[in-house]
Amino acid sequence: MNETVKNVGLFGLVACLIVGTGFVQGANAALVIVNFGLISAIMALGVNLQWGFAGLFNIGVMGFVALGGLAAVLIGMPPTTEAIAAGGGRMLIAMVVGVATIIGAVMVYCRMAPGRTRTVALIALLIIGFLCYRALFDPARDAIEAVNPAGTGYLGGLGIDGIWMVIAWPVGGMLAAGAAWVIGKTALGLRSDYLAIATLGIAEIIIAVLKNEDWLSRGVKNVVGVPRPTSYEVDLQADPAFVERAAGFGLDPVLGSTIYVKLQYSVLFTIVLAIVLILAQLALASPWGRMMRAIRDNEVAAEAMGKDVTARHLQIFILGSAICGMAGAMMTTLDSQLTPAAYQPLRFTFLIWVMVIVGGSGNNFGAVLGGFLIWFLWIQVEPASAYLLAAITAPLADGSALKDHLLDGAAHMRLITMGLVLLLVLRFAPRGLIPER
């Protein structure tokens, strides 16, 4: 079969599955799959840059996604003026002291000759800087979190609303890129398995910070009401012109407004995905892309040709992480809330890696296909399994231990399906559904 025809057929199959969902479960359910599929495809492109282009085994994806979500809060939520007045200034000074301590320690380490004097100076600087930082940070944190802890208890953000909220998406990418630079400077010299452990550990640290630093992200209290770059359903339902248009399509105002808002998100997310995909394709076909694949295939030979392998690894690690951070900001604006406890490795690491492997590592279109296909299965397998098991166990008496056990197992069919799909693809298409050319 012609490769182009096969690839178009695979995308067409996924499109038919989503359209079929619209006919069976309604347009609202289909658009939910489309929107999260678009976000998942963007995340898969970020991971594909790192693994497919450069062979970097990053399993700290959820940390960068969480930083993108934090960026949406810092950009969109209104500032808590009382909290800023109570401890905002001291918190800023504390952050400056902390950064200055780190920079000072690096300068001492780099500029002083190795020996006891450097060691003593470094330890003394770190201890004094830490004590000064805590002396400023602790009172500021307590003052901020004491301001209406049930409703706010944090500094808030810049208060940007409306279509300008899309600014949060590139800001999320920049925040993730900054974290990736710090991580990359310390961890990219490690062997691939140690790099994976390091990125996972750092991602867990980022999540722990978001869960516990209430002054920054409200922790496990969650931030709700994050502004959107789209219309609001309530406003649409109060607009007589929209109500009339919805009635023209045979929709009630509530369902019509929900579908309309989701369509707006779909358009915005599609634009972002198209931009990222085009840039990734241009990078893949460029001399830079060929160099990255050469480094991936044989680092020793690439170094012998004068290529700075560590610098190139750092470069693509930052780019891939920035894309994941941008996707995280998009998801937070779609959900309209930041829930740090929801950033689990199963959703933001394992599932994204399955998307890349199943779609085709090293192929950008394969990553996009995997993003849509795996997300569709992740959403639809559980209800489909519940329906199927209910039909199978219908002859059994209510209260039967076997019937209850089978029905309870429907929730676990997601994991079984992901494992089965991964095994089948690795057996019959080890390079993915759309392999690297």
Image (spheres, rainbow, N blue to C red):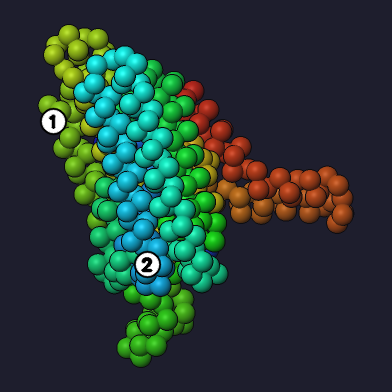
Q: Residue at x 32, y 88 (%)?
A: 241
Give how far across and how far down residue 423 sits, in percent.
Answer: 53, 28
Q: Which one is in front, 244 or 53? A: 53
Q: Quadrant of residue 51?
A: top left
Can residue 11 be spotted in the picture? no
Viewer-nearest of discs 1 and 2: 2
Query: Would you say the residues marked 1 and 2 are in contact, meaning their CB atoms lie under 8 Å apart?
Result: no
Give how far across and how far down residue 102 sits, in percent.
Answer: 32, 36
Question: Can you say whether 398 is above or below 146 in the image?
Answer: above
Q: Which one is in front, 215 or 295? A: 215
**Mark 1 surroundings: few (<14), some (14-19) or many (≥20) residues within 10 A:** few
Q: Residue at x 34, y 33 (%)?
A: 125
| Residue 140 horizontal side relative to residue 314, left or right | right
Residue 286 is labelled as 1
Position of the C terminus, as image quadrant, is top left
Residue 84 is labelled as 2
Give how far across and how far down residue 294 sits, in percent.
Answer: 22, 18
Q: Residue at x 40, y 72 (%)?
A: 82
SS for dot 2: helix
Position of the N terminus, as image quadrant, is top left
Identify which amino acid the numbered label 2 is placed on: Ile
Identify which amino acid the numbered label 1 is placed on: Ser
